[in-house]
Image (cartoon, grey):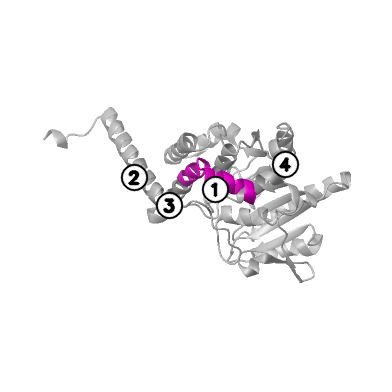
Amino acid sequence: MALLLPLSLPQLGAVLAVLAALLLLLVCMIAHITAVKMPTLHRHAEEKFFVSAEGRKEPVPSIHDPPTKELSVVVPSYNEEDRLPLMMDEALDYLEKRQKRDPSFTYEVIVVDDGSKDQTTEVAMKYCEKYGSDKVRVLSLVKNRGKGGAVRMGVLSSRGKKILMADADGATKFADIEKVEEGLKNLQPWPNQMAISCGSRAHMEKDSIAKRSYFRTLLMYGFHFLVWFLCVKKIRDTQCGFKLLTREAALRTFSTLHVERWAFDVELLYIAQHLRIPIAEVAVNWTEIEAKSVMSCDGDKGCRQAENILSQLHCRRECFLSVQFQVYCIYYKC
């Protein structure tokens, strides 16, 4: 009969803690078994070209080539025909005004259509036609890779000395690029020309908590704890989609990125941390935009994504501890 009595709060907390620990242990065991050593970098034949404003097919450049622009802006886009114009108008207005003030400043915006089912490519091509394909390029992926995969494809096709990741929803005020640039500058001298400056919403955490449900707040703290415990210690907001990298830092990190979907940022910063790339975290203005799609927390899909993230990060630990990986980085400039 005693077993049928309801548990007290301390007892319930203890039971939940044990269950959480067992679940984490199970996921880590699966991660250990399924971990893959190095990522497969594959580009379909159609993804080796972009269409110019005149309608010609032009080969995409490589991040291994010397830079020819001051700044590359990579915009991953999936079904963003409605939100993309607002972001592009704001970004290009800023970039054009900056170029008029400083003619030596050159830039490109790379819109990566991540296998969209709407008119994202057509919307982006209108900007290519307006500003020219030297300033705006559209890279259309054959199938959906996920945000991390789309950003990586754009980064590996960029020409800038510095490379900025920016979300298509325009949640971060684009002019705040000056803040992350200042953060990058403050990290000088850059070891091996590598540095990363991350936009951060951590200063807005109290306001965001007040607007969230208890369940979402609990999930947020749980995710932050796992990121801190397993991966990245010194960055409070790993998920803000506004990050500025030097070209060499982008080459080293994105060439060895495993996670192509949700939370790829965590692995990106984890790689940077192990390569001893200096990282700055800078507060930016951010507005919450209604999400078009979120990771499912329901059923198998969300579990598979979470398992994949931990699997790849576990793999990353093994790789960085191996001599083989270090030799790979040196000879192949990963």
The circle on residue 26 is: 2
Q: Which three-letter amino acid code belongs to the residue tagged 1?
A: Phe
The spot of residue 13 in percent (x, y) is 31, 32
First in residue order: circle 1 vs circle 3:
1
Q: For the residues marked 3 and 4, what is the alpha-carbon distance in whole angstroms? A: 32 Å
The circle on residue 209 is: none
Give the label, 4 or 2, closer to the camera.
2
**Between 316 and 168, the one nearer to me in the picture:** 316
Q: What secondary structure is marked by label 4?
A: helix
The spot of residue 318 in percent (x, y) is 47, 43
First in residue order: circle 4 vs circle 2:
2
**Dot 3, crowdedness within 10 Å: few (<14), some or many (≥20)?**
some
Residue at x-position 60% and y-position 67%: 44
First in residue order: circle 1 vs circle 2:
2
Q: Is residue 11 above or below residue 47?
A: above
Q: Which residue is mark 4?
A: 177
Q: Is residue 157 above or below residue 18?
A: below
The spot of residue 223 in percent (x, y) is 46, 39
Q: What secondary structure is marked by label 3?
A: helix
Q: Is residue 47 magenta?
A: no
Q: Which residue is mark 1?
A: 264
The spot of residue 30 in percent (x, y) is 37, 49
Quadrant for residue 138, please give it.
bottom right
Judged from this view, the residue extending furthest toward the left is 1
